[in-house]
Amino acid sequence: MATSTNKLDKMQSETEIAILQIQVKNLEEKIGELKVDLKALHDVIESNADETRQMLKSMREQDVKEHSELASKISVLEKWRWMMMGAGIIIGSMGFPTLTALLK
């Protein structure tokens, strides 16, 4: 009886070992799939980061362009303002009687 119990225990142990080996292989396959999925996810994240950098660079270039256009418009307005102030000073220094004589 002890021998048949030992054989049964040995068979049961071998069966458990076989089951564990299958489970380990299944885990290895799933880990391999996870590695592939992680690599794909990394590639997508990297691609999105590159696109975001490119968009930010493009926005920055557009901002610089628009700021320089606005600065040139403001510069023209400032020149016009100073010209009008100068004209006002000249007309004011001529005096009111001279101005009425010129406008008649």
Image (cartoon, rainbow, N blue to C red):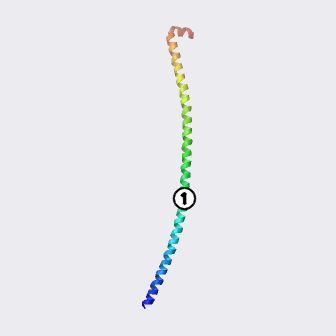
Q: Mark 1, residues whose alpha carbon is within 10 Å: few (<14), some, or many (≥20)?
A: few
- The residue carrying mark 1 is 39
Quadrant of the frame with the C terminus: top right
Residue 71 image point, x, y percent:
54, 30
Q: Amino acid at mark 1?
A: Lys
Quadrant of the frame with the N terminus: bottom left
Label 1 sits on a secondary structure element that is helix
Nearest to the observer: residue 39 or residue 48: 39
Residue 32 image point, x, y percent:
54, 65
Residue drawn at the location 52% of the way across and 13% of the way down: 90
Q: Residue 77 lies in what quarter of the image?
A: top right
Q: How many marks?
A: 1
Residue drawn at the location 52% of the way across and 71% of the way down: 26
Residue 55 image point, x, y percent:
56, 45
Residue drawn at the location 54% of the way across and 52% of the way down: 46
Give the answer, above or below, for where 8 lies relative to 19.
below
